[in-house]
Image (cartoon, rainbow, N blue to C red):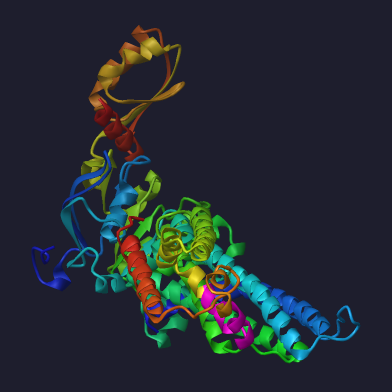
Amino acid sequence: MPPTLVIARLTVQETSRRRLILALIILTLIVVGFSAWGFRKITTVTNSSGSTLPPEQVALITSQLLIVVTFMYSGVLALSAAVVAGPLISSEVESGLLLSILARPVRRSEVVVGKWLGLGVLVAIYAAGSAFLEIAAVDWATGYVPPHPVQLVLYVGAEGLALLSLGLLLSTRLSGITGGVIALVAWLMGWIGGVVGDVGTGLQNQAVENVGVFSHLILPTDLLWRGAIYAMEPDAFLATLRAAGTVGRANPFAAVDPPPLPFLAWVVVWFGLMLALSIWSFRTREI
Amino acid sequence: MAAAPQGAAAGLPAIQTVNLSKRFGHTEALVSLSMTVPRGEVFGFLGPNGAGKTTSVKLLLGLLKPTSGEAWLLGRPIGDLQTRRRIGYLPELFRYQGWLSAREVLALHCELAPLPRSSWKDEITSALETVGLTERASDRVGTFSKGMQQRLGLAAALLGEPELVFLDEPTSALDPVGRHDVREIIRGLASRGTAVFLNSHLLSEVEQVCDRVAVVDHGRVIAAGTMDELLSGTAVKVRVTGLDDAGKNKLASFGNIDDEGDQLTFTNLKPDRVPELVAEIVGLGGNVFEVSPRHQTLEDRFLQLLEEEDK
């Protein structure tokens, strides 16, 4: 097996042996169970006239609650990716673990790519697995299925992968705690940058709107999150948002359009840049 | 970096360096290290803490980049990926994956080395047996004592019958039995033609197993040679009372003194000066109980060299 895949396998094995995967599975099952119970309640609650809600209203409320629940999942994924990626390389440099590995015929680029791959696989599996379970639970509870479930998984997974890439880059130079904290702050700043951009949209102020655009270019997590929201919104809700004009676009938990294609192309370039920077940074580091 | 300067690959030295230097900011960690370690030789690299020993090993293994100078391992420039297949390395400060068993750690290193999969079982069994970890092979490394981790590190360094092995303080966490075992392992490596580069603070250990040594201080090699060349002098141990510090200072003309209270060791003193020394001590009011000239030990010589370097 090539060294890159050996390192990737080792990364997956480590998270498994350290019971991170088990903890995430248990937590996800608990959240899915509670949310299924909660979503089920939407179909049985009554309005002021004493009757249960019509199917359109159930679908609308469910779609909005699902966005909030997914925000939590994407948060867990982003936090986990940042916290796990932060010490991925730095802790092994500090402990001397990498000394014995790098004395073997292993390139530093293979270590970086291997760790990115290993953790990337876990991020993808978690994004797909948790999304499938949650969507299945919501479908069972309310009969509602978001319009674009595959895109939803891709956007949430890509958001986690973006945080993982940032954490890994920081890990090549900074201690695990520092790198993890910076990645988390960057994620929140990116989200706030997106909100500021929304305010600019609402005010029709180009300069303020550009804050959101720049923050999306520097760290694309927020716009990927907007893509996930778009994938969950029913057509009726989208029509309402569009009818509201710029005001409808100024909402961090709503998206009128999917992320534009040039932006998605930039995300691919961004991933490449982050990996290239990580490799360069680690190759030039003396250990 | 150019190809190795002399000979065919098989006949080339295990290690050759020419003016190898490393600077960290304003600190000279290693200055113009030029040396040759032939194949099959056990080479001791000695020096106090911070002298540049570990830096030298890391430079040779390509973990650090030299500021200037050149070096070759097994005839290939340092940093060459393929050469690392033929090298074993036990780092000074290290930790293995605590969540793996000892056998799994060694399997990982077999895979990265890379060794043919068919040979892994025998390689791992043999390495575990050599370092005395057979019974703990299935235990997680996280439960190992520091000494056991050091044994495991040594086992990893021995995998695949390397042609050159770097051992950076291999016995720092071991008990006397473990140290004896390591000496035997080093002798075994030398007997099968493996060159060993041994960094160690334990001078008696180096003295027992090394063919040649180099002493490094403040990044510079201050002495190098075979044991016979380095330890040609005589040390004189004197057990004496009644001498204060001023009195002891007056004995400086007899060379470097290792002062341990009532026991003074003159680390390099010719035997024919012993009567003169005793007369001087008595003249200073000292009471001499014992005078025993002996061959200089590596520790005597080491202390003498560092003393001279500081002057």
Residue sitting nearer the eye, B37 or A224: A224
- Residue B283: image location, x then y, percent: 34, 7
User: Could you tell me what secondary structure mostly forms the magenta stretch?
Assistant: helix
Camera sees residue B210: yes
On screen, B266 above or below A145? above
Compare residues A236 and B259 and report the one nearer the observer. Answer: A236
What residue is shown at x 13% (from left), y 62% (from top)? Answer: B1
Residue A62 in the figure: left or right of residue B260: right
Compared to residue B162, the image places residue A45 above or below, namely below
- What residue sits 46% from the left and 56% below the top? B180
In percent of the image, x 25 and y 56: which residue is there? B65
Q: Is residue A179 magenta?
A: no
Find the magenta span and give its range: A225-241
Residue at the left extreme?
Answer: B6
x%, y% of residue A158? 49, 77
Q: Nearer the viewer, residue B251 or A197?
A: A197
Q: Measured from the top left, where is residue A175 in percent x and y? A: 47, 54
Which quadrant of the figure contains the N terminus of chain A? bottom left
Q: Is residue B296 visible?
A: no
Asked if residue A230 is among those painted magenta in the image, a careful observer would answer yes
Along the line of sight, which residue is nearer the eye, A143 or A50? A50
Q: Is residue A196 above or below residue B203?
A: below
